[in-house]
Amino acid sequence: MSFSIKAIELYVRETKPGRMHFSLGKDTKTKQGQTGLLNPLGHIRLILTDSKGNETFGCSADRLSVRWLDKRPGRSLDLKRRELVSFLNQGREIALAVGEFETPFEFWQKVHPQIMKLGREFNQEDLTSSFVSAQFERAVLDAFCRAHSQSIFQMVKGGHIGFDVSQLHPELQNFPFEQSLPLTPLTSFWIRHTIGASDPLTDRDVKDDERIQDGLPETLEDYIRKDGVRYFKIKVTGDPDKDLMRLKSVWDVVVNAQVPVISLDANEAFTDLKTFEKFLVRFDRELTGMFQHVAYIEQPLPRQLTLDSTTKKSIQRLSELKPLLIDEADGTTDAYRRALNIGYDGTSHKNCKGVFKSLANFALMQQRSINGRQTFMSAEDLQNLPLVPLQQDFTTLGILGIEHCERNGHHYNFGLSMLSELDRTAAIKNHPDLYIQKGDEGFLNIVNGQVHCASLQCPGFGIATEPDWQSMMKMNDWVKLRHPPNRTR
């Protein structure tokens, strides 16, 4: 049966100001307690039509996180948001012009190269282009699975989405992809709690007049005690002296968790290899106990330097101290293969970088592991918020079998407060394992450091019912209102 896209609409759901300030590392001047980040969630609504005339909706969504996608200096938030919305509109036109296709992978093969080419023509980062492509990819996957009344796990495991991994990694021509997947989807996940550079660690770090007092944990100590978290991700700044001092303070707290597992995230902060090596050697020597609990280090170098083959000897030496993982450098479908050849061991999964890319990277990881290479995939995404982004990402993790994931949206945002009443009610009703009602609000249901979400294995891509589009703004109206062309900040 063939399919075509009848319509695509772009929306934005605005969120309320974050509960607290967050900084990746270098910007630590803003005091805790001041207004936190606003997190506009870009949404895609797609109508898929089959050759018999049946119509099915599909959706996708992600935070419009331009500060992460594009870190080039001299480019304002307003400019980057306007460009991203323009790019999404151009992606919409590309997707609508595809015509008939039989599988989501066929659709992706037609759309993804065009979007990547367009991004380069308009001086966009590859990561931004991947983000744009991923929105339409996931909406088509959602609609396609829904049209077949199957969950995405069933469709991927059964080989029904048309995926051919050798089209991305030719060396996997005979790789048994479907057989390499879990027999059943993973539906329970350990929550990895991210510790930003400005996040309070203990009660002593929060002044009485700065307390939020909204009933939720406010400090790292609180989260360990109340939610039972034992997986932690610590932001570092690229300044060895400063980072080691902060790590010592964090270790004094997380050592009290049950068997703590730690990762570090530099977000491209180490601008040269010598500084990174100096930090790593000192970390091993000065905080040996903590160092032994570190599972991997994420994106230590700028994305441009990460895939520079001249760094191979140094990266291979440093990866013997701790496994290294790429994140921001993973902007193209061949980035992980190139990184493996340099000496990196892992790559991050994020739905916003593309599901087909993650499926291909999973297969590449499995093939290299079979051949004796220790490789891995992690699950990252600091502000993966309800409804659509959070649920679709958990659903992909179920396919990939990744047992723990970065999830801090509930820390910086108050429950399901960004949703309309209709969406909030539907979320709690349809997914009572994932969300819990407390008073008038719904929250992510974290029990002993884990969430359970078997209810996401519903027809489609983790979304049981159509989102409340009437509660959102049309994306083009939103960008004119929030990021007018005459403003540069």
Image (cartoon, rainbow, N blue to C red):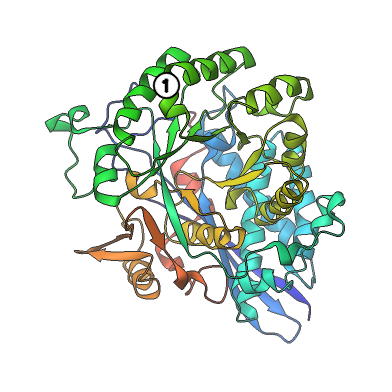
Quadrant in which the N terminus appears: bottom right
Left or right placement of residue 254 versus residue 33 in this view: right
Q: Toward the viewer: 12 or 351?
A: 351
Residue 188 percent location from the top left of the image? 45, 62
Asked whether the viewer can see residue 25, the reply is no
Disc 1: CA contacts within 10 A as few (<14), some (14-19) or many (>=20):
some
In the rendering, at what x and y percent does residue 220 appear? Answer: 29, 38
Residue 7 higher or lower than 409, as above or below: below
For the point 22% across and 28% down, the residue is: 205
Query: In the rendered image of this protein, does residue 489 appear above or below residue 426?
Result: above
Question: Of helix, strand and loop, which one carries label 1?
Answer: loop
Indicate whether 319 appears above or below 19. Answer: above
Q: Residue furthest left?
A: 208
Residue 26 in sight from this viewpoint: yes
Where residue 191 appears, x then y in whole percent? Answer: 41, 50
Residue occupying the point 73% across, 29% down:
307
Residue ID for mark 1: 287
